[in-house]
Image (cartoon, rainbow, N blue to C red):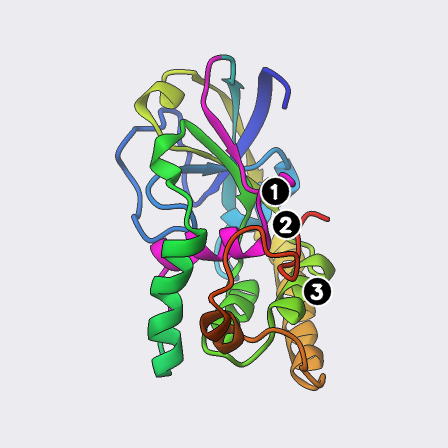
Amino acid sequence: MEKLLTIYHGSAQVVDSPTFGLGRNNNDFGLGFYCTESNDLAKEWAVSSLRDGFSNRYTLDTEYLRILNLNSPDYTILNWIAVLVEHRLFSIRTPIARRAKQYLIEHFGVNVNAYDLITGYRADDSYFDFAEAFLNNAITVEQLSRAMRLGKLGEQIVLKSRFAFSKIRYEGFEVAEKDRYYVLRKSRNDEANQTYLDIQEEEGDELYMQDILRGGIANGDPRIPGNVSK
């Protein structure tokens, strides 16, 4: 990672002074300020079908920051899922899912609050459905991994600590036009939905969540697919 980054935050409003401690706890990686290195992606995140949005631009000095890269070879897709289930609100439809949530956190969880900055893929709503299906034993971990690789997931950069917030500087904004960027956002969502339907039709003879529970599978097991960036 470069020491000095240009990053963007997609929002319904101009955010010229990011504030530590604001936001929602049930985002992908918990409370933090969510950005991306892609201006176009920030614009997609900023718009809805009814309104324009804003892509706020910043420079971030990453020197001396403790950085967690969930897309590095040190982590697998189950580490990413474990972080999601700890913070996002999942639909727990089965007894397996209740046990699976706790198991994933205990065996694959990562303490994101020990870091100043986190990079990792963003679980857009459609791709969140894949994670939820896996938790509820509906698709295998290999199907989940394939879905993530097929999808055009955006990598996000999340400021977690007060120190990280002290290293960000506002540089301006651009308007994100809903007529252009909502179409792109919807196209990404539609493609994900089709991928989900296609994968559900596959015969799954690989590792389901129940197999992971029964086998006591933990970090380092060679059957676990690598991180989603591969």
Q: Is residue 79 above or below residue 13?
A: below
For label 3, the residue is 146
**Numbered badge on residue 110:** none
Q: Is residue 85 magenta?
A: yes
Residue type for callout 1: Asn
Which percent across, then down, holds residue 221? 59, 56
The crowd level at tag 1 (other Cα within 10 Å; few <14, some 14-19, many 20+) is many
Q: Residue furthest left?
A: 21
Q: Residue 53 vs residue 74: left or right?
A: left
Spatial separation of the CA atoms under disc 1 and disc 2: 6 Å
Q: Amino acid at mark 3?
A: Arg
Say which residue appears at 64% left-offset and 37% top-offset.
Answer: 38
| Callouts 1 and 2 close, C-beta under 8 Å | yes
In the image, 32: left or right of 45? left
Vertical arrangement, residue 54 with respect to residue 108, above or below: above
What residue does disc 2 label? 227
> Tag 2 or tag 3, which sits nearer the N-term?
3
Magenta range:
64-90
Residue drawn at 62 percent across, 59 percent down: 224
Question: Is 114 colored magenta in this rendering?
Answer: no
Q: Residue 71 got which mark?
A: 1
Q: Earlier in the sequence, mark 1 or mark 2?
A: 1
